[in-house]
Structure formats: structure tokens, C-alpha cells
Image (spheres, helix red, strand yellow):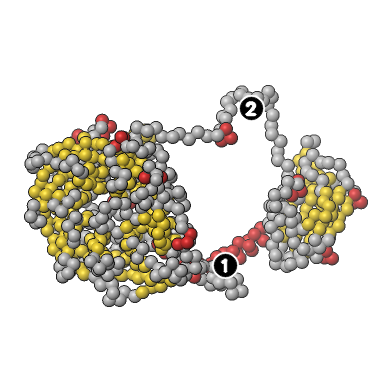
């Protein structure tokens, strides 16, 4: 873990066994409420006609976009329907009644023929509540609309704003609204993002016409905007001035305002830097620089052309079976049998060959060299073959004799990794070089067949050893273990702090600690001020972190450690098997809600997986449940928000394409 997310080891529970399934009892009730026509949808945007298709990052961001917005009025929420109407949802906690009001229709901006292929694409309309009456709504294109809910049922437009962009953004890109707030001087601050296409080079197409097309790299700019609220409703567009800008390679997951430091926290899969700052270039070390020789050029001060000598062969070759080991040493064929002395003991080898040094291989000389394993000396022997093999020498082919040791293993069935015990221990002796085993093809086939049988048994949950050693899968993973996805839970995140006043911040913007981590869950959206808590992956656990303490001594907010306050044991492990999750939210340390969101053939709703926090830090198990959101004819899940109850509980609202599903008792 990084300095930003330190781990409190006292809050970890290594003895946690797993989650116990609780059936969908009456405790998990839900109510369904049909949306007014034409309903909600996520299929309102397209990149057709743009210079470049949507990147994978953009597609993922739009799939997981939360379409259900919060209001400053308790019990009210908002979304933009398929016809671009702003719809207000009102929920009465006491009676459970739900009402819908279509209060405003967003105007549709038509592109001129000159801007049809400018590289931009529409985005989702996003409503943000500024106060109980004021809403700022992005139209998914280039404008922001400020509206006033005069009597709660109808909206009166106050002003429309258009971003005053720098020269490089004259293409008028589509904006996504992330957050907005009222400031003391009667103005509005908002944070938006948009895609930027950077032309890289010209690539030749594979068509026969050999035309060229420009290649683009997609990056994303995050802009801080300032807008004045006019005294009276205006017919034209007002300017939205850019007060700061950051650029990165991803779309923000969330943007929140920290009142203490007057700064915005951008949470995304990559960091964001000021576009005027030069990127740090990677400078390779001298060892990493490989010079490229040119014709006739001599490198490293060479005065003559030399050829590197071939590597020396290993001092021996060896192979083994289930009960034997065979070691072959090259020896000059002119060596007399009387010049060879071999002593094989159960634990050691002593071998001495009286012969002059050979230029192609070392002469074997071993004194009390310990075997890797014990041998049966009485059944072991050695042979000497003068005509062993032919090698290529300086004066032509030469015959090399083979001194072969035939060893019987004392422990039958034990495979040796090396011939000698000292090999692989870091010894620098020439005879201790690692020599790979030469395996007979038939023996290799037998080994592979045994491994295939063993792995097949493990995948089927059987004891492959026959010795009662288990199935190879921990009890925690029974029924959920998936080797391909087990380590893929969560998404990488970086935290970028940006001062609201722009470049005039009193704290050093470059002093933040590296904040790379893996995010498992975000706090369930509710109306509250400040920075939300995060659940960060730590091995197979999910660690709950609260924002840094307000009275920290660090000047830069990015140099304050977050507080590890609780642990959802094995959360990363269980989430890894859920490959079709759209949202993962938590409610304090009480529960984590993982919502499915894939397209289904049968319109029967989506699942929500409920993982409750342990009842005590040392609890061996915790409760889990799975319930279906709605039923038939609800549509895909496209938004989730929460409403805190008077007793401290949480009502969860799930916006589907055709119905609103309310879960009053899951959190």
C-alpha cells in the first residue's frame, strides 16, 4: 500500500473463513414504480460521424455512468429521460409513495455541417442540484443550463452557459458535468470534462487505394469553470470562464470538493497534470543504452574486428528416471582407463581424471562432492567409452570420450532438481554451474500426462494425490474460485488535488504523494458535504478508508494519509468472480452492495450482491445475500442513489430503464 493509504494491521482478520449466504427473506423487501413515458435510457449518445470512435476508456465510463442524481430537498432525486426531459422523483419516507414530475425539456443543439466531423461526440445530460430550487444541467453537448424550480412542479430557465475555451479547443467538444456548487460571491463553480483528439501520425490503410488516415490519441481535459448568475433570465448564452485545466488519460470516476483546503479531489484511473507543465521524460541509464553499429564502425574502442568466443559447454549432462540418475562427463578419448579414479559413496562423489586441460570442455575433478540426494552405492557403477561422441575442433571433427555414472536412487520416486547439493545455492565454483536436465522424449510425455491429470483433478474439485491432501482450493474459494479473474477485482485509481482558485494556490501542487491504489467500492451517493470514503484493495481484503483528518499538519492535501477505519474481509476475493458488475457501493462499515448491469436476453432484472461487514473484528464469518432487482419489464439498471432514514438506516433507489426499484432494508 502507498503512503496515502497506510494499513492498520490490528484491523485485519486473517482467520476470516468466508461469507454465509442468507436467503432472500421478507427482510429484503422492494417496491416497484413505473417511470413516466418514455422512460430512462442510456442509448442517447453516439460517436458516429466523429474523427475517432470511442476508446475503451470512454465506453467503460459510459456503461458505468450513474444517471440518478441527488437533490438538496430530502427525498427528491432527478434524472434525464429518453426525450431529454428533466424528471424530479419525490419519495415520501412515511407512506412510501413515489411521484414523478417532468419539469424541464433540454433544448437540442444541432451541429452545423462544418462541425459534423470535428472529433466530438455527444455525452450524457447530467443534472446537479445547487440548492433546493436551483439545478445546473449539462445538455450532453456544449451548453450548461441553470434552471429554477419555482413552485416545485415547473422549472424556469435562468441562463444558459457556454464554455469559453482556449484556442486548441475551438472544436466545441461535448462536456460531461461532474460537480457544481454555489460560491459566496453569487457565482457558480463547476467541473466538466471532455475528450481531446491528438493527431499522432499518418497511417497507411490496408486497402488497395493505399490512402492515408490520421491516427489519434484520445486524452481527456478536466476544466474548472466559473459562471455568474444573472439578475434576470437571459435569452442568449452566458460565458463559462475556465479557471483551471488538467489533462490525463482517463475520465474521472468522481470529482468532490474539500472545503477545508478549497480544493477539488479528482478520482480517476490515471493522474491529471496541468497542460503547461512538461512531462518528465524517461532517461535510460548507461547500462540500458545499446549503441547501434554502422557499417565499418568499431565500438568500445575496438581496433580490430574480433568475434566473441562461443560459450563453454556445461561440465556434464544428466538425466533421471523414477529410480536412477545418469551423469555423463566429456573426457579426451586419448585418456587411459587407468587415469580415471571414481569413488561413489551413498552421499559423496570423488572423481579424478589425469589428463591435460582441453580447450572445449573442463576436465572433471571432484573431491567429496555431495549428491543432491542419497544413492545406493552398491548398485551404482561407471563406464568409460572412448568413442562416445564427435565434436567439432579447431583442426576438424574430433572424438570425445564419455565417462558415465549410473546411479541408483535410494529414495525411489524422488525427482532431483540438480545432481549436486551445492548447485543453486549461490556457489561460485565452476563445477556448481546449473546444468538443466536432459529429459528423454518419452519421459517428458509421461510427465506432461501426469500434470494434465493432476490439474484436471484440481479443476474438478477432486483430491489428485489420493493422500487426503485436499482439492487444492481454499475453503474460502469453494464454488467461487476462478483462476482467470481471481486477481482482477477493482480498478486502479489515482487521486489528483486541484486548488479551486486555479494556479494561485498557496500549497505546492507537485508535492503530493503517489496515490496509486486499487478501488473496490465508493460510498453510496447521498447528499453530504466533503470527501467520501473509499474501500481499497489489500490482498484479498477490502479496507475502508475515511478522508484525512481535518487538522493534519500537511499543507498539501495529497500529503495527508487516509484513515483505515474498518475491513471488509475477503471482499476483493468475492468481487473477483463477479465479472458483470456496473456499480459497487458501500454504506459506512455496514454493507457493500455490488450491482450487476449487463444486458440480458430475458428482461428479468439484475442481481445485487450484498456483503455485510463482520459483527466483530475477529468474526470468522459474515452475512451475504443475493436479491433480484425488480422482475420482468424493469429494463437495465442505469443509476443508484441512497436516502438516509431517520433511524440511521439507508433506503437504496435503483433507477432502471422502465421502473424505479426501491430497496428499503438492504443497508
* Figure check: 571 above or below 149: below
Asked whether residue 643 is in view, the answer is: yes
- Residue at image position (30%, 54%) is 64
* Secondary structure under the numbered disc 2 in the rendered image: loop
Residue 482 in view of the camera? no
Spatial distance from mark 2 to mark 1, Cα to Cα? 54 Å
- Across and down, in percent, residue 143 comes to 18, 42
Q: Look at 26% across and 43% down and name the residue there.
A: 191
Q: Is residue 509 left or right of residue 393?
A: left
Q: Position of residue 476 (x, y in %)?
A: 47, 68
Q: Residue at x 17, y 64 (%)?
A: 91
Mark carried by residue 300: 2
**Quadrant showing the C terminus:** bottom left
Q: Nearer the viewer, residue 411 or 359?
A: 411
Find numbered disc 1 in the image and state the secondary structure of the residue it sits on: helix
If you read the primary sequence from the N terminus, does the residue marked by circle 2 or circle 1 appear first?
2
Residue where numbered disc 1 is placed: 453
- Crowding at mark 2 (Cα within 10 Å: few <14, some 14-19, many 20+): few
- Please tell me whether mark 2 or mark 1 is closer to you in this view: 2
> Is 141 on the left-hand or right-hand side of 438?
left
From the viewer's perspective, is 451 left or right of 201? right
Residue 433 bears which disc, if any? none
User: Total label count?
Assistant: 2
Contact check, label 2 and label 1, Cβ < 8 Å: no
Give the residue displayed 15% in from the left and 45% down from the top. Answer: 145
Q: Is residue 162 above or below residue 465?
A: above
State the residue in front, 648 or 552: 552
Amino acid at each position: 500500500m502507498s503512503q496515502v493509504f497506510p494499513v492498520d494491521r490490528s484491523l485485519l482478520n486473517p482467520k476470516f473463513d468466508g461469507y454465509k449466504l442468507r436467503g432472500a427473506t421478507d427482510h429484503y423487501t422492494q417496491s416497484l414504480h413505473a417511470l413516466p413515458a418514455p422512460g430512462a435510457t442510456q442509448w442517447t449518445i453516439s460517436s458516429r460521424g466523429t474523427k475517432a470512435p470511442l476508446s475503451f476508456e470512454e465506453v467503460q465510463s459510459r456503461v458505468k455512468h450513474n444517471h440518478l442524481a441527488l437533490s438538496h430537498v430530502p427525498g427528491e432525486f432527478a434524472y434525464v429521460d429518453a426525450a431529454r426531459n428533466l424528471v424530479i422523483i419525490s419519495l415520501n419516507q412515511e407512506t412510501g409513495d413515489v411521484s414523478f414530475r417532468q419539469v424541464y425539456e433540454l433544448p437540442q443543439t444541432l451541429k452545423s455541417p462544418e462541425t459534423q466531423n470535428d472529433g466530438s461526440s455527444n455525452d450524457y445530460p447530467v443534472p446537479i442540484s445547487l440548492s433546493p430550487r436551483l439545478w445546473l444541467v449539462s445538455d450532453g453537448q456544449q451548453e450548461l443550463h441553470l434552471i429554477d424550480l419555482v413552485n416545485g412542479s415547473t422549472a424556469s430557465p435562468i441562463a444558459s452557459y457556454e464554455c469559453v475555451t482556449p484556442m486548441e479547443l475551438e472544436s466545441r467538444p461535448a462536456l460531461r458535468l461532474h460537480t457544481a456548487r454555489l460560491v459566496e460571491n453569487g457565482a457558480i463553480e463547476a467541473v466538466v470534462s471532455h475528450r481531446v483528439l491528438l493527431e499522432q501520425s499518418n497511417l497507411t490503410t490496408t486497402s488497395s487505394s493505399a490512402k492515408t488516415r490520421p491516427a489519434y490519441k484520445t486524452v481527456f481535459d478536466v476544466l474548472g469553470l466559473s459562471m455568474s448568475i444573472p439578475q434576470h433570465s437571459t435569452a442568449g448564452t452566458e460565458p463559462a470562464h475556465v479557471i483551471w485545466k488538467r489533462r490525463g488519460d482517463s475520465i474521472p470516476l468522481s470529482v468532490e470538493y474539500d472545503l477545508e483546503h478549497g480544493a477539488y479531489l479528482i478520482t480517476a484511473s490515471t493522474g491529471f497534470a496541468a497542460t503547461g507543465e512538461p512531462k518528465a521524460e524517461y532517461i535510460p541509464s548507461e547500462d540500458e543504452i545499446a549503441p547501434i553499429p554502422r557499417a565499418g564502425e568499431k565500438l568500445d574502442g575496438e581496433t580490430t574486428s574480433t568475434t566473441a568466443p562461443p560459450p563453454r559447454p556445461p561440465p556434464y549432462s544428466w538425466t533421471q528416471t523414477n529410480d536412477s540418475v545418469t551423469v555423463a562427463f566429456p573426457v579426451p578419448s586419448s585418456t587411459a582407463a587407468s587415469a580415471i579414479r571414481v569413488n561413489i559413496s551413498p552421499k559423496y562423489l570423488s572423481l579424478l581424471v589425469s589428463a591435460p586441460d582441453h580447450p572445449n570442455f573442463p576436465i572433471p575433478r571432484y573431491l567429496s562432492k555431495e549428491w543432491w540426494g542419497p544413492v545406493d552405492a552398491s548398485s551404482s557403477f561407471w563406464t568409460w567409452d572412448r568413442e562416445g561422441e564427435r565434436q567439432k575442433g579447431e583442426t576438424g571433427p574430433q572424438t570425445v570420450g564419455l565417462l558415465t555414472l549410473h546411479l541408483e536412487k535410494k529414495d525411489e520416486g524422488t525427482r532431483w532438481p540438480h545432481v549436486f547439493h551445492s548447485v543453486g545455492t549461490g556457489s561460485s565454483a565452476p563445477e556448481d554451474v546449473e546444468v538443466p536436465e536432459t529429459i528423454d522424449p518419452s519421459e517428458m510425455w509421461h510427465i506432461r500426462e501426469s500434470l494434465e491429470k493432476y490439474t484436471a483433478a484440481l479443476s474438478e474439485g477432486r483430491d489428485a494425490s489420493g493422500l487426503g491432501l485436499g482439492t487444492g482450493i481454499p475453503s474460502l474459494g469453494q464454488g467461487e474460485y476462478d483462476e482467470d479473474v481471481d486477481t482482477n477485482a477493482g480498478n486502479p485509481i489515482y487521486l489528483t488535488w486541484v486548488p479551486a482558485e486555479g494556479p494561485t494556490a498557496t500549497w505546492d501542487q507537485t508535492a503530493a504523494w503517489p496515490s496509486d491504489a486499487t478501488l473496490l467500492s465508493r460510498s453510496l451517493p447521498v447528499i453530504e458535504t466533503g470527501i467520501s470514503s473509499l474501500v481499497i484493495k489489500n490482498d484479498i481484503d477490502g479496507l475502508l478508508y475515511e478522508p484525512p483528518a481535518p487538522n493534519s499538519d500537511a499543507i498539501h492535501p495529497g500529503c495527508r494519509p487516509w484513515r483505515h477505519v474498518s475491513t471488509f474481509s475477503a471482499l476483493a476475493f468475492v468481487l473477483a468472480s463477479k465479472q458483470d458488475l456496473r456499480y459497487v457501493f458501500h454504506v459506512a462499515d455496514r454493507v457493500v452492495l455490488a450491482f450487476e448491469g449487463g444486458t440480458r436476453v430475458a428482461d428479468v432484472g439484475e442481481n445485487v450482491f450484498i456483503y455485510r461487514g463482520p459483527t466483530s473484528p475477529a468474526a470468522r464469518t459474515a452475512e451475504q445475500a443475493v436479491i433480484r432487482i425488480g422482475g420482468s419489464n424493469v429494463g437495465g439498471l442505469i443509476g443508484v442513489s441512497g436516502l438516509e432514514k431517520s433511524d440511521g438506516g439507508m433506503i437504496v433507489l435503483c433507477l432502471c430503464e422502465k421502473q424505479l426499484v426501491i430497496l428499503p432494508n438492504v443497508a
